[in-house]
Image (tube, rainbow, N blue to C red):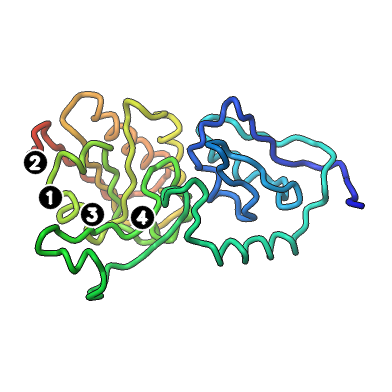
Amino acid sequence: MTTKVLRKIVRIDEEKCNGCGACVPACAEGAIEIIDGKARLISLKYCDGLGACLGECPQGAITIEEQESEEFDEEAVRHHLQAKELVSDTLPCGCPSATVAQFGRGTDAHDPAQVTAEASPRSMLSHWPVQLTLVPSGSPFLDQADLVLAADCVPFAYAGFHREFLKDHSLVVACPKLDDFEAHQRKLKEILSHSRVRSLTVVHMEVPCCFGLVHMAKRAIRLSGKDIPFREVTIGIRGELRS
C-alpha cells in the first residue's frame, strides 16, 4: 500500500494553461509533460515540490500547495529520466521547441542539408528551443554566446537571415505585439543575468510595434546589471536591410 504524506506539491490550473511547454524543461525531475495540449503532472512521486517551474509559466498556471500525496521518490525519478533518455526522439509536445538541444553543423555527406546545398542554403540553426518563452536561462547554448533576439517575422522577411545573423550565434525569437511583453522582459533579464552572454543583437521589422523589442532588450540589460554590447538592426517590410 502506498504511504501518503502531507507535503508541498505542484498544482497546474488547466483553465489557465495554454500548453506552451515552458514548464517542461524547467522541471529537472521530468514530472511535467504536455498531454492533450495541457501541462500535466504525470506522477506525484516525481515532483519534489520545490517549484523550479513556477517562474517559467507565462500564464501563471502553476502554484505550490500542500496536499496528501506519495512521498517524493528520488530513485523513481532517476529511472524515469533514464527511460526518457532512451526515447529522446519523443518530445514533450511533439515538437523540438520544448526540449533543450544543442547540435553542430558539420560536413557529413549524409546530411540532407549538405546534399541539397546547391538547391537550398544550409541551415545555420544550432540549438532548440528558440522561442524566448521556452528557453531556460541556464541553457548551454547561451554560455559565451553572441545572442540574437529576432522578431518572429524577420526570418521570413529577410532572405539573408541565416547567413548574416544566425551563423555562429544563438537565437531567441519573440513578438512584442502578440506575446506577453512583461513576461518576455523578465525572461530576457534572467537569461542575461544567469548566463555569460557576450553580446546582444536585436533584429526587428520597421513597423512601430516591433521597436518594442529594442526597448525590452535595453531594459533587460540594465536590469541584469551587466555591461553587454548591444546592436540594433531594422528590416524593411519588403525584406530590405534598413540599418
Q: CA distance from mark 3 to mark 4?
A: 15 Å
The residue wearing badge 1 is 160
The residue wearing badge 4 is 197
N-terminal of the pair, mark 2 or mark 3, is: 3
**Which type of secondary structure does the marked residue at label 2 adopt?**
loop
Residue located at (54% from left, 62% from top) = 87
Q: CA distance from mark 2 to mark 3?
A: 15 Å
Q: Position of residue 143 (x, y in %)?
A: 40, 60
Q: Position of residue 46 (x, y in %)?
A: 71, 52
Callout 2 amino acid: Leu
**Which type of secondary structure does the marked residue at label 1 adopt?**
loop
Give the number of the mark in front: 1 or 2: 1
Q: Position of residue 98 (x, y in %)?
A: 47, 48
In this image, 10 relative to 163: left or right?
right
Callout 3 amino acid: Leu
In this image, 49 relative to 157: left or right?
right
**Which type of secondary structure does the marked residue at label 3 adopt?**
helix
N-terminal of the pair, mark 3 or mark 4, is: 3
N-terminal of the pair, mark 4 or mark 1, is: 1
Q: Which mark is residue 166?
A: 3
The residue wearing badge 2 is 241
In this image, 39 relative to 143: left or right?
right
N-terminal of the pair, mark 1 or mark 2, is: 1
Callout 1 amino acid: Gly
Q: Residues within 10 Å of mark 4 (few under 14, many from 20)?
A: many
